[in-house]
Image: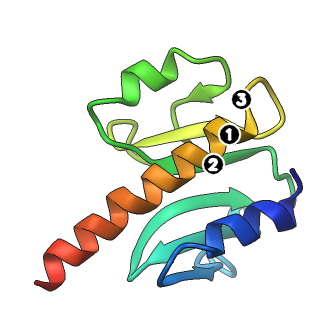
Amino acid sequence: MNVEEFRDFCLSFPDTQEGMPFEGFFKNSQSILVFYVGKKMFCLFDLDKFDRCTLKCDPNFVDELRGHEGIDKPFNLSPKHWISVDLNGDVSWELIQDLVTKSYQLVADGVLRKST
């Protein structure tokens, strides 16, 4: 999997937008690409490194997922609701796709609930 394949996968979900909200604000975060549903993030990663992604996660599964090799606490986001996934290690592409899909669904469900 390369950065373009991963980007295309994230953009394949309905109503998904992408952006680089930290560009110009934080020197070490200028190449962070973020995927949104509405105005809520569900996935982000560094375009320059493309070594990890950060995903929204159901708090009930965070500890269980962190038991897997390659899944850890996120950098600079709440460890109760977010996980960091190693994109170049032992985490399979199938598991990464599943985690991204669940992250999208979790955020999309929240956005939908707020709009009704």
Residue 94 badge: 1
Say if 32 sits above or below 21 in the image. Answer: above
At horizontal 65% and vertical 49% (from top left) the residue drawn is 53
Q: What is the CA distance from the residue labelled 3 to the residue labelled 2?
A: 10 Å
Residue that protrudes farthest toward the left in the picture? 116
**Residue 10 in view of the camera:** yes
Label 3: which residue?
Answer: 91
Residue at screen point 76% across, 40% down:
87
Q: Nearer the viewer, mark 1 or mark 3?
A: 1
Amino acid type of the residue that numbered disc 3 sits on in the rendered structure: Val
Residue 55: x, y in percent? Answer: 51, 50
Q: Which residue is mark 2?
A: 97
Cα separation between marks 2 and 1:
5 Å
Residue 43 coordinates in the image, percent (x, y): 55, 60
Quadrant location, the C terminus: bottom left
Q: Nearer the viewer, mark 3 or mark 2?
A: 2
- Cβ–Cβ below 8 Å for labels 2 and 1? yes
Residue 109 coordinates in the image, percent (x, y)? 27, 66
Q: How many residues crowd mark 1 within 10 Å: few (<14), some (14–19), many (20+)? A: few
Q: Secondary structure at mark 2?
A: helix
**Dot 1: element:** helix
Could you tell whether 64 is left or right of 49 in the image? Answer: left
Kindly report the distance in space between the C-alpha atoms of the residues bearing marks 1 and 3: 8 Å
On screen, residue 12 versus residue 66, left or right, reads right
The answer to whether residue 26 is visible is: no
Residue 55, compared with residue 65, is above or below; it is below
Q: Which kind of residue does numbered mark 2 sit on?
A: Gln
Sooner in the amino-acid sequence: mark 3 or mark 2: 3
